[in-house]
Image: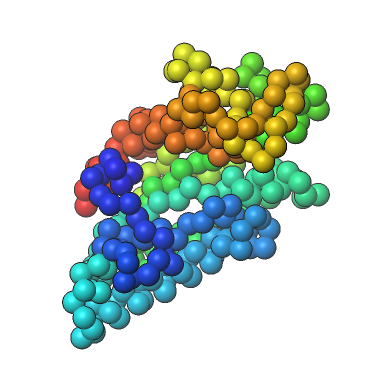
Amino acid sequence: MAEELGLAYLRAYLDSLALSSFKNGANVATGGSPIRKDKGYSPFHLDAQIAQFRQFKARTIDIVNSTQQEKGKADLPKPEDFSKALYTFDIGQNDLQFGLSTSEGARAIIPEILDLFSTAVQQLYGEGARVFWVHNTGPIGCLPSNNKYYYGKEPLDKNGCVISLNEIAQEFNRQLKANLAGAAFTYVDAYTAKYNLINPAKDQGFVDPLDFCCCPEKVVLNGTVYGGPCANPLKHISWDGIHYSEAANQWVAKFILNGSMSNTLIPINQACHA
């Protein structure tokens, strides 16, 4: 997004102001973040991120309105920028993945996840947020790690994706879209963008989408050896069996940022025009 808009990358909220500029905003996301509290892979659940955003906003306004040094003010957004900013979300997949390993089950917790998400958005709205860019969740059944775990246990589609897991992701996305109906959101179909890469992967210059590298140890699955360093990272969709490679992310971003995967059809530069 930053590259498409010609902006510097967003700095992490916890970076030092002395070493960073936040005038284009801040990133409060972390790897592995869930929406639900204490039920995921990271303690930085969505509610904690909202709290950090509120702190960032309050401290920014305090510094800008104070008599503190101009350097700090120059590297922070203006108070009025918070109501003009684009608030982006890409969260929920970790909740579903975590739910797969619990007695609750991933499908059963979708309403709870989305209720918490809605509450978080309402809190941001109360802080002045008005423009939201929301990614739905990707095809979790196509993650190589899930193929490895469920191989021989669950039916697979022609690409080796676990059908039942993708159906869970699709149900999450259906309810997410319904949850956002009638509000000022740009709903981004990241699921379709990612699956449109996985389905014709070899035609797009990539290797088998289930092939991955850079994991701690090699794994033999159905006679194929996975893991170890990538001979050509630019041809891999997944680099560790869970996360997309830089090359795959750039491919997906091309469709997301031009608006072709958005409802309504709006490119990122127009979403930020206000």
Query: In the drawing, does residue 112 fall left or right of residue 155?
Result: left
Of the pair 237 and 99, the residue shown nearer to us: 237
Query: In the drawing, does residue 72 fall left or right of residue 128?
Result: left
Residue at the extreme bottom: 67
At horizontal 25% and vertical 49% (from top left) the residue drawn is: 7
Residue 25 place in picture, x, y as percent: 32, 60
Residue 74 place in picture, x, y as percent: 20, 69
Q: Quadrant of the N terminus?
A: top left
Residue 101 visible in this rendered orientation of the protein: yes
Task: Look at the picture and state if 159 lies above or below 102.
Answer: above
At horizontal 76% and vertical 31% (from top left) the residue drawn is: 150
Q: Quadrant of residue 106?
A: top right
* Count of marks overlaid on the render: 0
At horizontal 33% and vertical 51% (from top left) the residue drawn is: 9
Q: Quadrant of residue 260?
A: top left
At horizontal 80% and vertical 24% (from top left) the residue drawn is: 152
Of the pair 162 and 129, the residue shown nearer to us: 162
Residue 192 visible in this rendered orientation of the protein: no
Residue 53 place in picture, x, y as percent: 42, 67
Residue 206 place in picture, x, y as percent: 49, 20
